[in-house]
Image (cartoon, coloured by chain):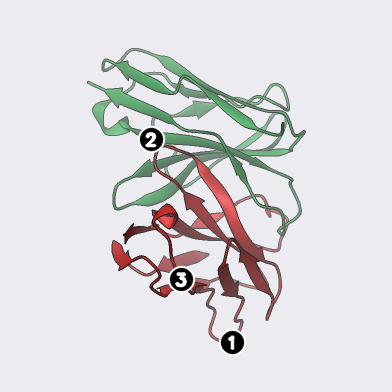
Amino acid sequence: GNSVTQMEGPVTLSEEAFLTINCTYTATGYPSLFWYVQYPGEGLQLLLKATKADDKGSNKGFEATYRKETTSFHLEKGSVQVSDSAVYFCALKPYNTNAGKSTFGDGTTLTVKP
Amino acid sequence: EAQVTQNPRYLITVTGKKLTVTCSQNMNHEYMSWYRQDPGLGLRQIYYSMNVEVTDKGDVPEGYKVSRKEKRNFPLILESPSPNQTSLYFCASTVSGRASYEQYFGPGTRLTVT
């Protein structure tokens, strides 16, 4: 079946540091890939997505590139802020008749200190 | 405003007392889903629904029931709650059949079973 493996957390960085959260996946065909963010006390919301190989999703300074050859979708940001402190989830949706069903990683907690 | 709503947001109950958590979306999405979030276990799918009167088990369905009588509503029913169902629950919805569409999440329901 499908699976998503995320870099274990928690991750603690100083403000303006570079961020990478690794995500690799196992799926047949060409799934769509997503990063969701969960701020304290809130539900998940979409951060960015990519729907085909070599696509780059970007939003709020975050980027991730869909790498089919390495089955990866690593999240990066060049300079984190305290407001980026949150839990980040990598997820995939398969490209088949059950495309509504998503598979999520375990989540990575990021804390950014001033 | 496009949104997914859940009620209640917080619930404390006792073992064996039946409860229902409601979920409603106003985006005319076909696909709806329930997840539970537990520390160290990430997000796990409980049940999902592809459309009215069409539901199926997710990864952790034991002890839960759902129904989908209307497109906008997808209640989660715990007929005899137990302490191991203490968790944070999220409802989500998305367009069915399109892998590129992200899920929209509700704000969460924190359930405590004593």
Is B77 above or below relative to B38?
above
Q: Which chain is green?
A: B
Kind of residue sitting beneath label 1 = Glu
| Label placed on residue A79 | 3
Disc 1 is placed on an element classified as loop
Residue density around tag 2, few if under 14, some if 14–19, many if 20 or more, within 10 Å: many
Question: From the viewer's perspective, is residue A96 above or below residue B91?
Answer: below
Q: Residues within 10 Å of mark 3 (few under 14, many from 20)?
A: some
Asked if one can make out residue A21 in the rendered structure from this viewpoint, the answer is no
Residue plotted at (39% across, 30% down)? B63
Please state if A62 lies on the left or on the right of A87 as rendered: right
Question: In which quadrant will I find the N terminus of chain B?
Answer: top right
State the residue in front, B37 or A27: B37
Q: Mark 1 = which residue?
A: A69
> Residue most toward the bottom?
A69
Q: Position of residue B26 (x, y in %)?
A: 72, 29
State whether residue A88 appears in this view. Answer: yes
Determine which of the numbered discs, if any, sits on residue B88 in the image: 2
SS for tag 3? loop
Q: Write down the chain letter for disc 1.
A: A
User: Dot 2 falls on which chain?
Assistant: B
